[in-house]
């Protein structure tokens, strides 16, 4: 079976296992819309890892499950879209997602394909972010902004890893390194905003402390960037650490989304 068929079959299994749930409310919509941003970058990370033989089993799983979840949430968000403008955004995202999906699974990952993948990941990210911001603006509650900010941290964790792996592969290395460093700065700034939020509960505060601790390890791994010839160990460290910080930030985003 070709790699494309294997990935799409894996994605279908993941999707059928999850089921097509509906968006529960506006906070849930902002959460899921923000998660689409993260998935755009996690898929790029998976592609970059596969192309360099970094944790291939984990990378393949991350790519397949991310594709399945992106498909599922896109259906949900299109159905929920409360305004014509938001519906248009998700129609545009659906079209660009089709292009991105084809680049991800159309052929065995290589450096030439990686250039296209990174470009399409940015285009999908821009539209996913547009939808998230539009949904946040329809919310009358301050917590909607916190859901957006925390959700964006998930994306930044994956964006840093994706660009680290791209630079390691010497794929547009200069711009990849610059984007990685920019994402680090944005993550730290947003973490400070979240830490000062008056809506924080004890549990959220504890999770934010854990996120800060995890980010220390993540930064240390990112500092070992070697353009064009990174070691498998260092790239594996970045991949695994980004997964851990993603989980923590996803927990935090879910907690914010459940605040009334």
Image (tube, rainbow, N blue to C red):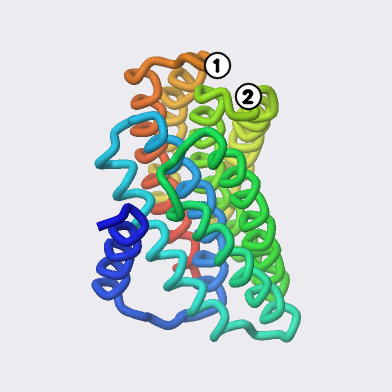
Question: Which comes before the other along the chain, label 1 or label 2?
Answer: 2
Pick out the residue farthest to the right: 85
Residue 90 pos. (x, y %) = 63, 74
Residue 191 pos. (x, y %) = 57, 39
User: Residue 201, can we see it?
Assistant: no
Q: Quadrant of residue 160?
A: top right
CB within 8 Å, label 1 to label 2: yes
Residue holding disc 1: 227
Tag 2, which secondary structure? Answer: helix
Tag 1, which secondary structure? Answer: loop
Left or right relative to 86: residue 8: left
Q: Quadrant of residue 214?
A: top left
Left or right relative to 241: residue 131: right
Q: Tell me the quadrant of the picture where the N terminus can be found.
A: bottom left
Identify whether 168 is placed above or below 211.
above
Identify whether 248 is placed above or below 185.
below
Mark 1 → mark 2, Cα distance in angstroms: 7 Å
Please name the residue shown 37% across and 80% down the image. 21
Total numbered badges shown on the rendered structure? 2
Left or right relative to 15: residue 157: right
User: Residue 170, can we see it?
Assistant: yes
5 or 15: which is nearer to us? 5
Q: Quadrant of residue 243?
A: top left
Residue holding disc 2: 173
Q: Residues within 10 Å of mark 1 (few under 14, many from 20)?
A: some
Residue 188 pos. (x, y %) = 60, 33
Please name the residue shown 65% across and 29% down the image. 172
């Amino acid at each position: 079976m070709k790699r494309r068929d294997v990935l799409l079959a894996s994605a279908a299994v993941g999707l059928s296992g999850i089921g097509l749930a509906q968006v529960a409310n506006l906070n849930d919509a902002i959460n899921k819309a923000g998660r689409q941003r993260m998935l755009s970058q996690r898929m790029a990370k998976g592609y970059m890892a596969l192309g360099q033989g970094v944790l291939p089993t984990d990378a393949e799983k991350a790519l397949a499950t991310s594709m399945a979840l992106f498909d599922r949430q896109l259906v949900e968000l299109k159905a929920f879209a409360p305004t014509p403008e938001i519906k248009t955004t998700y129609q545009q995202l659906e079209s660009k997602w089709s292009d991105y999906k084809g680049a991800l699974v159309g052929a065995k990952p290589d450096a030439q394909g990686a250039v296209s993948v990174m470009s399409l990941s940015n285009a999908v990210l821009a539209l996913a972010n547009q939808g998230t911001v539009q949904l946040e603006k329809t919310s009358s509650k301050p917590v909607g902004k916190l859901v957006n900010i925390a959700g964006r941290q998930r994306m930044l964790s994956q964006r840093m890893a994706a660009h680290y792996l791209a630079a390691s592969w010497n794929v547009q290395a200069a711009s990849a390194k610059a984007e990685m460093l920019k994402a680090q700065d944005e993550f730290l700034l947003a973490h400070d905003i979240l830490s000062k939020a008056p809506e924080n509960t004890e549990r959220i505060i504890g999770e934010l402390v854990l996120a800060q601790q995890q980010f220390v390890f993540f930064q240390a791994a990112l500092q070992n960037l070697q353009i064009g010839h990174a070691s498998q160990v260092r790239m594996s460290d970045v991949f695994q650490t980004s997964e851990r910080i993603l989980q923590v930030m996803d927990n935090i985003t879910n907690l914010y989304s459940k605040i009334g």
